[in-house]
Image (cartoon, helix red, strand yellow):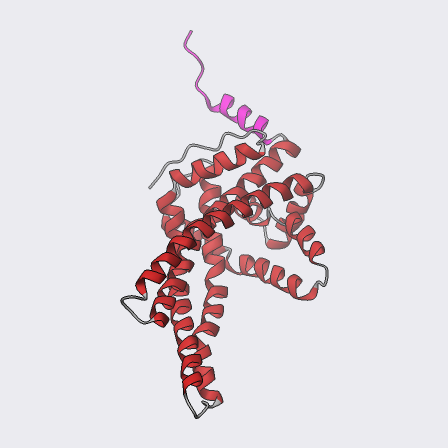
Amino acid sequence: MSAPVPLRLRPLEIGDVLDETFRMYRRHFLLLAGISVIFSIPLAALSGYGYFALFDYISTQATSSNPGDFSTFVTAMAPLAAGVLVNLAVLPLLYGGVTYAVCQSAMGNPVTLWGALRGAFRRYFQVLGYYLLFVLMAVLFCLFPLWIWISVNWIAVLPAMFVENTGLFTAMGRSWRLVEGKWWRTFFILLLVLVLNYVVSLALGAFLYLGQVLLTILVSPYLALALYEGAVVLVSALVNPVLLIAIVLIYFDLRVRKEALDLFQLAHQVTVSPPAPA
């Protein structure tokens, strides 16, 4: 069990957000990475097996004089379809668990793996509804900029739910009010973190690709591809907490800038501190 120091609330510049993000990740690496990797293991297995089955099916069809029937194609695609469903099922636990752990750490509360999982389970359907809403908007909206505008306005929904113990719709309204007037600043911080995530994932993916090329010397290309795809999922799981930590920090930063939350924290510290000896 860890006993984290409360986040020192203050207005955060973009560089401060990045520094604090990596500081928190280093401090709680085993916990945050553990939550993310645990729920990504079945996704990695299904992804690897799915690609293996799909490319094996394509290879068989290319070299066979008798094309397979529809049932054979369905069998080949089933692991990938199962991966999509499993991903949808575990996503609220993965994102919810990491966000809950980061929020508790920022507030100075002890946080454990089981505590984070219990927190994620309590908000499971609300987190699931939140991400399904994003998917629905992506399908229905013809204008991608509109989707981005709404997504940034709702970026603080998960931290608001876990910190303020509110429901989904209340948290959506809360996030919208916090981001109001700070949209562009919030957007640029998110964009920078996403670019950083992409660069790190790309660099790690390059090493995995090199490993795949070397692995083809020992095993079949399809098995090497399956192992590579599974490893990509696990590497992505190690990078995912960076974005979630940054989102929590953005939430607290918005509250500091719009609600002077840092002054409330300072007043509380003065109240609970013992008087100085005469």
Q: Position of residue 262 (x, y in %)?
A: 57, 28
Say above or below: 17 vs 233: above
Secondary structure that dominates the magenta span: helix
| Residue 117 in view (yes/no) | no
| Residue 127 in view (yes/no) | yes
Name the quarter where the N terminus is drawn: top left
Q: Nearer the viewer, residue 136 or 252?
A: 136
Q: What's the residue at 57%, 43% (across, down)?
A: 192
Q: Position of residue 54 (x, y in %)?
A: 43, 76
Say above or below: 80 vs 107: below
Q: Which residues are magenta?
A: 261-278
Q: Answer with left or right where residue 176 lies relative to residue 61.
A: right
Q: What's the residue at 68%, 41% (across, down)?
A: 184
Instruction: Answer whether residue 147 is magenta in the image.
Output: no
Q: What's the residue at 46%, 57% (across, down)?
A: 93
Residue farthest toward the top in the current orientation of the protein: 278
Q: Answer with left or right where residue 38 lies relative to residue 188.
A: left
Quadrant of residue 48 in the image? bottom left
Q: Nearer the viewer, residue 260 or 21?
A: 21
Q: Position of residue 73 (x, y in %)?
A: 47, 83
Q: Position of residue 239 (x, y in %)?
A: 45, 49
* Total tally of numbered discs in the picture: 0
Q: Nearer the viewer, residue 52 or 104?
A: 52
Instruction: Answer whether residue 271 is magenta in the image.
Output: yes
Q: What's the residue at 47%, 24% (across, down)?
A: 272
Residue farthest toward the bottom in the current orientation of the protein: 66
Say above or below: 171 vs 10: below
